Image (cartoon, grey):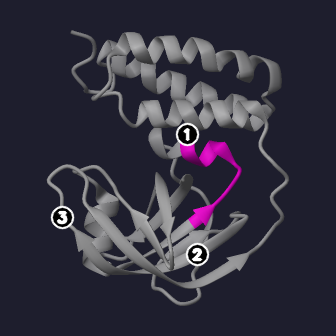
Amino acid sequence: MIQEVIITTRHPDGRAHMAPMGIRHTGQHIIIAPFRPSTTLDNLLAGRSAVVNYTDDVRIFAGCLSGRTDWPLVDAQQVPVSRLAESLAHTEVELETVKEDPERPRLICRPVFTQTHSPFMGFNRAQASVLELAILVSRLDRLPMGQVLRVIDYLRIAVDKTAGPREQDAWDWLIERVVAFQTGADGTRGLP
């Protein structure tokens, strides 16, 4: 099973970095597997620690992918990395082993501290749709645009029916990112 979370790491110069990422739990370990190139990968290899933040605020996922990364952070308990102040829970991890791969190395991490901050009250369908769109946006350079647009049309149904203000903001930020990619306005190649 893959869980969608926000990973916080620390740059060598001390700045915090956050990124949405899917993780896996295997036995007593958490596996983080970022695609190369990745600031999260570089920071985790350099600092050997991270925080796994569990949140239901999909704006943070969308924000990380659309240049909105000014979310409140606080110090973690056991590792020198910040955590999201508004997370429902968080797990602090230390890197134990790296399984090298040219595209997507697997970082095997040992949890050293976990804390719950607020109860999880469940997702609505719009939150799930925003998470799916966030995953697509993180892979725009690897997926055919026709496929992305078809999935967006399907996901939009749940957003139109169940989104609150947070989900609508997150959706809009991600759609802006898709449009910028399509037109090349974000400095990417855009559509062929």
Residue 70: x %, y % from top left: 55, 55
Q: Residue at x 61, y 14 (%)?
A: 154
Image height of 90 relative to 163, above or below: below
- CA separation, marks 2 and 1? 21 Å
Say whether disc 3 or disc 1 marks the residue closer to the N-terminus: 1
Which residue, given by chain and number where applicable, does mark 3 sit on?
A: 100
Residue 113: x %, y % from top left: 59, 85
Residue 84 position by quadrant = bottom right
Image height of 60 relative to 51, above or below: above
The stretch of residues the image draws in magenta is 53-61
Say whether disc 2 or disc 1 marks the residue closer to the N-terminus: 1
Q: Does residue 20 appear in the picture of this structure? A: no
Q: Residue at x 44, y 22 (%)?
A: 178
Of tags 2 and 1, which is closer to the observer?
2
Q: Is residue 86 magenta?
A: no
Q: Secondary structure at mark 1?
A: helix
Which residue, given by chain and number where applicable, does mark 2 sit on?
A: 91
Which residue, given by chain and number where applicable, does mark 1 sit on?
A: 62
Image height of 33 relative to 130, above or below: below
Residue 88 position by quadrant = bottom right
Residue 13 position by quadrant = bottom left
Q: Does residue 117 appear in the picture of this structure? A: yes
Residue 169 horizontal side relative to residue 98, left or right: right
